[in-house]
Amino acid sequence: MTTANRWREAQAAENEYWTGLSAATVQQILLRNASMAEILNTWVPGFPSPAIEIGIGGLGVGLLGFVPGIQVRIGVDPLPLVHPSCGEELLREIQSRRDALHFVRSSGEALPFQNACAGLVVCFNVLDHVSNAPQVVGEISRILRPGGLFFWVLTRFRISGSPSGTSGPNHAMPTKSLFVPTLTASWNVTSKSCAAQADLSW
């Protein structure tokens, strides 16, 4: 199967996943994102703006929905926003956090932003879902301004390609060839943290 076909399959699975979320899963996602946003707040000095989150997910909240100190926050995803079946209170929270962000429907491989426009780019468990990870990383490098920050988290797969968590059809090819260009790009690593199962060497 070609990479393009696998990516289309993965996107269809992603859309099914987001539209079929239970209230408990929505709550779990929001809690996880809030927890990771706390780490983002501690690692990122000040509040660089604009901040762009690639692969914000169907809820349209992502991590940036929990970082109100950043003046301009933009969420990017190739899939449309969904309206999960959950209680009114949870829906109001989702909508409130969505309203604080600008949503752009686009793939990470072709970001519709000017060169050197972003102070911060966020990717949380995204690079294992894209069609062309090196191209996404190239786009991130293009849109970050000098001194800009790239907050990158990948918890589901080892760089060797073997799964470190659950996997399914919504994950694109988790192969070493996808991630090495990310690690060898001309980034200055300011902080790093690897889970016990992560197969990363810096």
Image: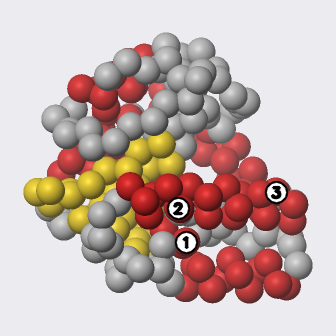
Query: Which element is circle 2 on?
Result: helix
Residue 25, label in figure: 3
Q: Is residue 77 left or right of residue 163?
A: left
Residue 63 locus on image (x, y percent): 53, 63
Quarter occupied by residue 196: top right
Q: Is residue 193 left or right of residue 189?
A: right
Residue 131 locus on image (x, y percent): 45, 36
Q: Residue furthest front?
A: 42
Task: Determine the residue positioned at 43% across, 20% down.
Answer: 200
Task: Find disc 2 in the rendering and name its residue.
Answer: 37
- Name the foreground residue: 59 vs 16: 59
The amino acid type, in three-letter code, at marker 1 is Phe
Residue 113 locus on image (x, y percent): 25, 65
Query: Which element is circle 1 on?
Result: helix
Task: Find disc 1 in the rendering and name its residue.
Answer: 66
The amino acid type, in three-letter code, at marker 3 is Thr
Circles 1 and 2: CB atoms closer than 8 Å: yes
How many marks are shown on the rendered structure?
3
- Sequence-wise first label, 3 or 1: 3
- Sequence-wise first label, 2 or 3: 3
Disc 1 crowd, CA 10 A, few/some/many (<14, 14-19, 20+): many
The amino acid type, in three-letter code, at marker 2 is Ala
Q: Residue furthest left?
A: 146
